Amino acid sequence: MATAQLPILDFVARNYKNFNARATRDAMFAYWDHIQAGGKMYWAVAGAMSSAQLGISLAPAIRAGLVHGLSVTGANLEESLFRLVAHDSYKDFPDYRYFTKKDDTKILKDRMRRVTDTSIPEDEAFRSVEKILVPMWERATKNGERRFWHEYFYELILSIPKSKFEGNPDDCWLLAAAKAKLPMVVPGHEDSTFGNIFASHVKFNDCSASIVKSGIEYMANLYDDYKALSKGSTSGGKGVGFFQIGGGIAGDFPICVVPSIKYDLQEKVRPWAYFCQISDSTTSYGSYSGATPNEKITWDKLTEDTPMFVVESDATIVAPMMLTALLEAKANPKAADAIIKASRAETKKHLAKVRGA
């Protein structure tokens, strides 16, 4: 019965025994424990996950209450929107590894922008959205309004009529986040297509740079968001977990909020209650993307008691599977608890046998 109700969770529990598979299983089980205990989960998403259609699993996870806050790159933010309004105009290139420079030049001339094995259509995505977003910036300039970067995209995506959707709205994580009014930070949003477009309009004096609140203001607001999420955790104050895909500023920026509250604001703060990073970056000198969780202890971002997991694998494979299994668990909590309990009992029995030997 449990297998029929939760095929992905059951598959992981039965098959993922060692190496990155085991880390994936244990991280997923701990994620479920955290949510079941009333905890919140904050996601940091780097890379081109929106172009890879993470929204198919992330959007329902947001709606199901498995995600409570987001830190995303400007590219991931806008590319979720592009997938909604221009999905049918994307082109895929499964043989991209064998492309020549001439092949990519042809893609450029076709007004497509390749992201690994897929491509974003210039006219249907960038230019179509630009026609809506630039007037919003101009109105904000005229009225002296100031907003965070994501707030412009929240307003935009909620105002687009369904007749303009090419993608499935149920698969759009940005739409789900906007409807849920999830707290969000978009650190380094200038490093995105629309960040560049905005800069050009500032240069032309069409818009004022001040209509977009700064990264410093994002951090100041994150202080309040983190406190609210932490306070909102139930069942004995489980706290806020941190789930990170990739590295870079999307992860570096929000995880600093805990030590900053503690040392810079000099206020009491709950530590992060869970940490998991999915990344294919290996540990190297100076590479924060490959830094192990233990290193974060020295910066007081994590503690020795924080459940920590590192999955060295492709997030486009691992993250959707984890989210799908968690969605199954959310829909069938008793069956999920039984599967997880049985899996842990088996592991405990095996460890006892090994130690006894």
Image (cartoon, helix red, strand yellow):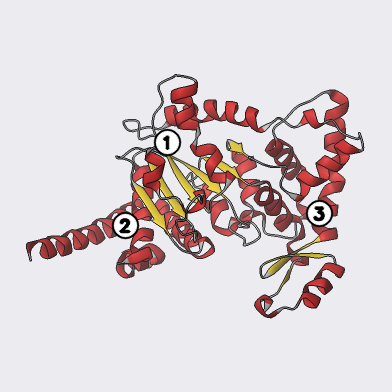
Q: Is residue 51 left or right of residue 223?
A: right
Choose between 100 and 214: the one closer to the eye.
Answer: 100
Which is closer to the viewer, label 3 or label 1? 1
Q: Label 1: which residue?
A: 299
Which numbered tag is attached to residue 335?
2
Residue 277, above or below 254 = below
Q: Label 3: which residue?
A: 126
Element under label 3? helix
Quarter location, residue 27: bottom left
The disc labelled 2 sits on which kind of residue? Ala
Q: Quadrant of the C terminus?
A: bottom left
Q: Earlier in the sequence, mark 2 or mark 3?
A: 3
Q: Earlier in the sequence, mark 2 or mark 1?
A: 1
| Structural distance between the alpha carbons of marks 3 and 1 | 39 Å
Element under label 1? loop
- Within-10-Å neighbours for mark 1: few <14, some 14–19, many 20+: few
Element under label 2? helix
- Within-10-Å neighbours for mark 3: few <14, some 14–19, many 20+: some
Which numbered tag is attached to residue 259?
none
| Structural distance between the alpha carbons of marks 2 and 1 | 39 Å
Whole-percent x, y for residue 319 in the image: 49, 58
Which is closer to the viewer, label 2 or label 3? 3
Q: Is residue 310 visible?
A: yes
Choose between 310 and 183: the one closer to the eye.
Answer: 310
Q: Residue at left 84%, top 53%?
A: 128
Q: Residue at left 79%, top 54%?
A: 163
Q: Is residue 355 left or right of residue 126?
A: left
Whole-percent x, y for residue 316 in the image: 54, 63
